[in-house]
């Protein structure tokens, strides 16, 4: 990771301590609006990104020492929200990556603290990464894989809140939909098990605390894994029972989520085909109607 730019006193957080509360709020809003406008001007973009990066770097110490305050978290989340605008725009996405800006967010994704101050940072950082992967782009996926985003997403999928787990799983899903991403996950036994184990743990938790959005992304991840022969073969023995015994039928029916039902059906069909191809005693559609509640 490149060394972050040095801090200076001229960043957007420089507000006179004696300023009364209403003007300070107005000034902060005006500063954020001006920074957003500056991001749209090519000649000002580099300096603006430097200022936003300084805002982020300024709380690394507090994050590491577990002394982060809600005010600090909110302040940096505002800066991250502006970075999300850059990450989502087609004209600025690749310069954003080439400047290694995503690496500034990784310290917030590598913490295991569950306090809301850290969760806000975690979720907003994931929002920036999610903006990068929302539109399929092989260059973006290649960069994120090289920067080791998968382990950071798995950490959030393991211990984050429901919404941060959902965004992290969406990111992993989008990465795996790229052929390079699927190969990355399925090339080694260790990486495949790391992903499949976290997916299975989340499914177990959903039995007690259902989340249709999270379930949708988990099932899509499993379906994509069945596109890889090695992973498909492994899932014949390690697929969670809750996906094969109709546990989530009522949830999917209540949500009228036909897309997720079809994904689940296709995933089970793909695994059944693999079993049949290895001389299994049952046909490829065996028990699928029962599993899908039909």
Image (cartoon, rainbow, N blue to C red):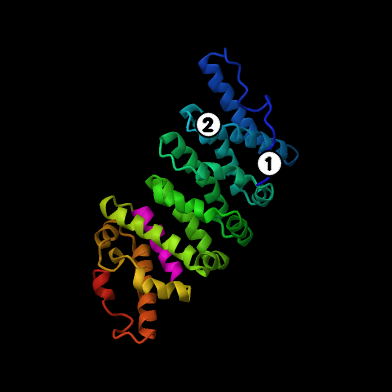
Secondary structure of the residue carrying numbered label 1: loop
Q: Where residue 186 sits: x, y (%)?
A: 50, 68
| Residue 44 drawn in magenta | no
Q: Which residue is mark 1?
A: 3
Residue visible at 57% across and 14% down in the picture: 19
Q: Which residues are magenta?
A: 212-226
Residue visible at 67% across and 30% down in the picture: 7
Quarter of the image where one finds residue 2? top right
Q: Which residue is mark 2?
A: 62
Q: Between residues 22 and 112, which one lies in front from this camera angle?
A: 112
Dominant SS in magenta:
helix
Quarter of the image where one finds residue 238? bottom left
Q: Where residue 254 sits: x, y (%)?
A: 26, 57
Q: Where residue 24 sits: x, y (%)?
A: 55, 19
Residue visible at 53% across and 13% down in the picture: 20
Relative to 105, say whether 238 is above or below.
Answer: below
Q: Residues within 10 Å of mark 1 (few under 14, many from 20)?
A: few
Asked whether residue 266 appears in the rendered view, the answer is no
Q: Residue furthest right?
A: 43
């Amino acid at each position: 990771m490149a060394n972050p730019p040095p801090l200076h006193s001229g960043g957007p957080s420089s507000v006179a301590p004696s300023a009364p509360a209403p003007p300070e709020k107005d000034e902060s809003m005006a500063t954020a609006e001006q920074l957003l406008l500056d991001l749209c001007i090519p000649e000002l973009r580099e300096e603006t990104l430097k200022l936003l990066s300084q805002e982020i770097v300024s709380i690394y110490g507090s994050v590491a020492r577990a002394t982060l305050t809600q005010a600090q978290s909110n302040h940096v989340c505002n800066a991250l929200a502006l970075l999300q605008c850059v990450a989502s725009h087609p004209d600025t996405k690749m310069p954003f990556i080439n400047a290694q800006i995503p690496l500034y967010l990784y310290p917030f994704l590598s913490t295991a603290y569950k306090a809301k101050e850290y969760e806000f940072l975690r979720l907003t950082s994931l929002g920036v990464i999610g903006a990068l992967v929302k539109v399929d782009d092989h260059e973006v996926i290649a960069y994120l894989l090289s920067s080791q985003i998968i382990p950071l997403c798995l950490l959030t999928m393991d211990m984050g809140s429901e919404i941060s787990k959902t965004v992290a799983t969406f990111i992993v899903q989008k990465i795996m939909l790229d052929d390079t991403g699927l190969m990355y996950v399925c090339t080694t036994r260790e990486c495949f098990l790391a992903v499949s184990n976290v997916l299975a743990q989340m499914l177990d938790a959903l039995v007690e605390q259902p989340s249709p959005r999270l379930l949708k992304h988990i099932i899509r991840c499993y379906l994509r894994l069945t596109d890889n022969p090695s992973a498909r073969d492994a899932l014949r023995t390690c697929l969670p029972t809750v996906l094969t015994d109709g546990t989530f039928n009522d949830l999917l029916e209540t949500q009228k989520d036909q897309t997720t039902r079809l994904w689940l059906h296709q995933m089970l069909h793909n695994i059944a085909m693999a079993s049949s191809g290895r001389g299994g005693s049952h046909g490829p559609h065996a028990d699928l109607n029962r599993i899908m509640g039909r």
